[in-house]
């Protein structure tokens, strides 16, 4: 079984909030989200994650400018599309095959991309590493433009739908993506694919000239 790996979906790779951290505060009346300064939230705000029943942040917040293209981090099928802006626009892409996740066993993996501005893919689409899937923004429970990225080991139900293997772990089934990054940018793979296409077109052109 192949070991699971991830390609960076945003360039440069800079983390604003790690998995498990608690840096977001939420106002129950205004529904506004802000970044935490220091160890506690200001008056009128509570911990965003504790309010929604989580131990802490369920993924990594990656630096991304408003409208910045975001690239697919692992091959798979678009299984989840969130279009309600108040919740944050987002995508969930499930791998085509199971992978070795080390201490977490062998499972399919759902990669989730959140707080987006828009998508370039639809539910059911097959996507590959290097493909643009959407654009960064600040939709939903967010304090600024960035990409929220998380991964969830999943398995299939008998009806073909998926369930989170570790749903009760305090992070809604998410696990830390940090050990799985292969330190290669997905958008660089896209350029490689385009180069291969160009080479093939050039070869075919000269073949037709013979």
Image (spheres, grey):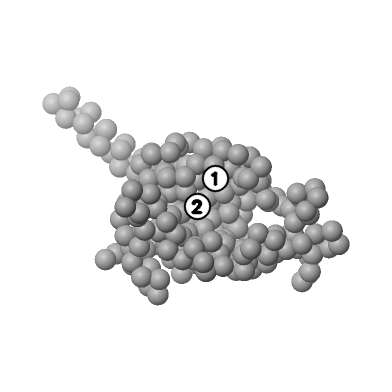
Q: Residue sitting at 77 percent across and 62 percent down?
A: 46
**Which disc is residue 52 wearing?**
none
Q: Residues within 10 Å of mark 2 (few under 14, many from 20)?
A: many
Residue 8 screen position, x and y as percent: 48, 56
Given the current orientation, which residue lies at the most extreme right position? 43
Q: In this view, does 87 lie above or below 165?
A: above
Q: Nearer the viewer, residue 127 or 162?
A: 162
What residue did someone put label 2 on? 112
Q: What is the quadrant of residue 57 in the picture?
A: bottom right
Residue 83 screen position, x and y as percent: 56, 38
Q: Is residue 201 left or right of residue 147?
A: left
Residue 206 screen position, x and y as percent: 20, 30
What residue did someone put label 1 on? 90
Q: What is the quadrant of residue 82 in the picture?
A: top right
Q: Nearer the viewer, residue 197 or 34?
A: 34
Q: Is residue 4 visible in the rendered structure shown here?
A: yes
Q: Residue sitting at 51 percent across and 66 percent down?
A: 168
Q: Is mark 2 on a helix, strand or loop?
A: strand
Q: What element carries label 1?
A: strand
Q: Residue sitting at 39 percent across and 53 percent down?
A: 162
Q: Split into 4 quadrants, where in the image is the N terminus?
A: bottom left
Q: Split into 4 quadrants, where in the image is the C terminus?
A: top left
Q: How crowded is mark 1: few (under 14 residues within 10 Å), some or many (20 or more)?
A: many
Q: Residue sitting at 42 percent across and 44 percent down?
A: 78
Q: Which is nearer the N-term, disc 1 or disc 2?
A: 1
Q: Do the residues labelled 1 and 2 touch (CB within 8 Å)?
A: yes
Q: In this view, does 118 lie to the left or right of 141?
A: left
Q: Is residue 107 left or right of residue 210?
A: right
């Amino acid at each position: 079984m192949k070991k699971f790996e991830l390609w960076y979906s945003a360039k440069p790779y800079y983390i604003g909030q790690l998995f498990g951290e608690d840096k977001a505060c939420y106002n129950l009346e205004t529904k506004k989200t802000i970044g935490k300064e220091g160890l506690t939230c200001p008056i009128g705000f509570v911990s965003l994650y504790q309010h929604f029943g989580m131990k802490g942040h369920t993924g990594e917040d990656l630096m991304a400018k408003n409208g910045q293209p975001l690239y697919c981090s692992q091959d798979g099928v678009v299984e989840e599309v969130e279009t309600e802006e108040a919740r944050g626009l987002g995508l969930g892409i499930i791998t085509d095959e199971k992978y070795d996740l080390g201490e977490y066993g062998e499972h399919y993996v759902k990669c989730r991309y959140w707080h987006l501005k828009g998508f370039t893919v639809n539910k059911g689409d097959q996507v590959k590493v290097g493909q643009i899937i959407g654009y960064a923004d600040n939709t939903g429970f967010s304090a600024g433009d960035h990409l929220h990225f998380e991964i969830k080991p999943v398995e299939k139900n008998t009806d073909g739908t998926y369930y989170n293997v570790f749903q009760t772990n305090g992070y809604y089934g998410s696990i830390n993506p940090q050990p799985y990054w292969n330190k290669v940018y997905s958008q660089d793979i896209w350029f490689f694919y385009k180069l291969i296409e160009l080479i093939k077109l050039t070869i075919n052109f000269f073949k037709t000239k013979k």
